[in-house]
């Protein structure tokens, strides 16, 4: 871990450690040295530049969810300390809606939801990030649908002409990380699975997924077995049947005491031209940022975790159709 604080023995130790320090130990100001001044943070909702913007957003979240816990389920990573390392950090969060904020007046509701953050780090600092939060899980537990919350978001931000526009390929910015992961066989195997699924061939799930596979999907959905897994991917793909699928980052790892794993960051870009997860086709140009993790066993892929932001997708649809009420 050359260039990193010696209290961190491994890169996962660093990622898990600073996350705990920032959020649960309330060391938010440590972002002044853990995040570079000009860090670029991309999420489906927007692009944020600079650690001061991240600090402000972190304090706002803690005001609304002061007891938030970030349970690190896994860190799938690639790279070296000398060249820089990319972590795909999957978090299971618990929180109580105890303060007023972007989700309205405090309700006391207890929440559980996942986040996946891809972070590039070098010399003890994170300088590039891609972040997906399961916003649809949060709003559902607070009594909204993703579709309706997207409308409310547009209204709260001042209407369609001035509201924050969701992230897409045109609003992206070039950061210091230029890598695309590694060439490990498990990352390649999972990339091949996703490419086949996105081509419309779901038979790969019967061939390559364990019959007892369990998956976690947006809106905190648990899919049990191949039929449920097929239903999720079919609903997504049918919504954007002609959209282009791109893999932007691919990691595979095989480490002691862990199953072989993979982390893939991907996108869909194209028209909302089919009926599926997002209702009747609207014709809207849509960009979907997605991150997927997989674990493999002796009978194929046995665990899958995929996050995308349903609210950001509905926001794009509403801004195109003008259906704001």
Image (cartoon, grey):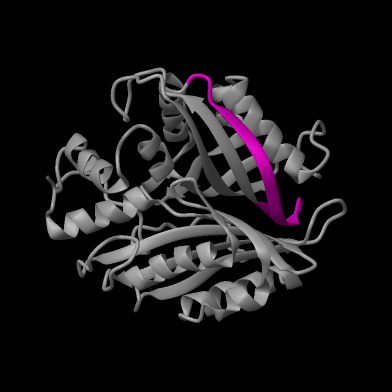
Instruction: Name the spot of residue 244 as percent of width and height, x first.
Output: 40, 76
Residue under the point 61% across and 46% down? 90
Instruction: Name the spot of residue 175 as percent of width and height, x first.
Output: 51, 55
Count of residue discs: 0
Residue under the point 41% across and 18% down? 98
Along the viewing direction, whichever of 190 and 158 lies nearer the viewer: 190
Instruction: Name the spot of residue 183 as percent of width and height, x first.
Output: 72, 72
Residue under the point 57% across and 26% down? 23
Residue lying farthest to the right in this orientation: 256
Asked if the stretch drawn in magenta spans residue 78, the answer is yes
Is 85 situated left or right of 321 in this image?
Answer: right
Does residue 221 appear in this view? Answer: yes
Q: Name the image quarter holding residue 300.
A: bottom right
Quarter holding the C terminus is: top left
Asked if the stretch drawn in magenta spans residue 55, the answer is no
Residue 321's place in the image compared with 137, above or below, is below
Along the viewing direction, whichever of 319 and 276 lies nearer the viewer: 276
Which stretch did the figure color magenta? 66-87
Along the viewing direction, whichever of 76 and 96 lies nearer the viewer: 96
Q: Name the image quarter holding residue 251.
A: bottom right
Residue under the point 24% across and 40% down? 153
Is 265 situated left or right of 309 in this image?
Answer: right
Does residue 192 appear in this view? Answer: no
Instruction: Name the spot of residue 232 as percent of width and height, x first.
Output: 46, 63
Along the viewing direction, whichever of 143 and 291 lies nearer the viewer: 143
Main secondary-structure element of the magenta-colored stretch: strand
Quarter holding the N terminus is: top right
């Amino acid at each position: 871990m050359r260039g990193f604080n010696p209290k961190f023995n491994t890169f996962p130790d660093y990622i898990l450690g600073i996350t705990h320090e920032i959020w649960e130990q309330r060391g938010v100001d440590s972002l002044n040295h853990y995040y570079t001044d000009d860090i670029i943070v991309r999420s489906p909702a927007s692009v944020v530049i600079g650690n001061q913007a991240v600090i402000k957003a972190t304090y706002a979240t803690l005001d609304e969810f002061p007891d938030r816990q970030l349970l690190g389920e896994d860190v799938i990573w690639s790279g070296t300390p000398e060249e820089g390392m990319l972590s795909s950090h999957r978090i299971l969060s618990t929180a109580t809606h105890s303060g007023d904020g972007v989700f309205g007046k405090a309700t006391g509701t207890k929440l559980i939801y996942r986040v996946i953050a891809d972070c590039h780090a070098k010399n003890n600092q994170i300088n590039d990030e891609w972040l997906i939060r399961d916003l649809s899980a949060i709003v559902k537990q607070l009594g909204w649908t993703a579709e309706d919350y997207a409308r409310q978001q547009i209204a709260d931000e001042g209407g369609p002409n001035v509201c924050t526009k969701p992230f897409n390929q045109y609003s992206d910015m070039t950061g210091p990380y230029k890598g695309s992961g590694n060439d490990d066989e498990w990352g390649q195997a999972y990339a091949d699975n996703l490419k086949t699924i996105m081509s419309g061939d779901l038979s790969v799930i019967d061939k390559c997924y364990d019959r007892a596979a369990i998956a976690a999907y947006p809106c905190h959905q648990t899919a049990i077995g191949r039929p449920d897994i097929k239903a999720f991917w079919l609903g997504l793909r049918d919504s954007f049947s002609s959209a282009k699928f791109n893999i932007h980052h691919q990691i595979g790892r095989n480490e002691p005491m862990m199953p072989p794993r993979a982390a893939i960051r991907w996108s869909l870009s194209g028209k909302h031209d089919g009926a599926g997860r997002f209702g009747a086709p609207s014709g809207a140009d849509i960009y979907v940022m997605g991150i997927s993790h997989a674990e493999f066993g002796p009978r194929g892929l046995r665990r899958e975790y995929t996050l995308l932001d349903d609210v950001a997708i509905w926001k794009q649809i509403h801004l195109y159709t003008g259906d704001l009420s």
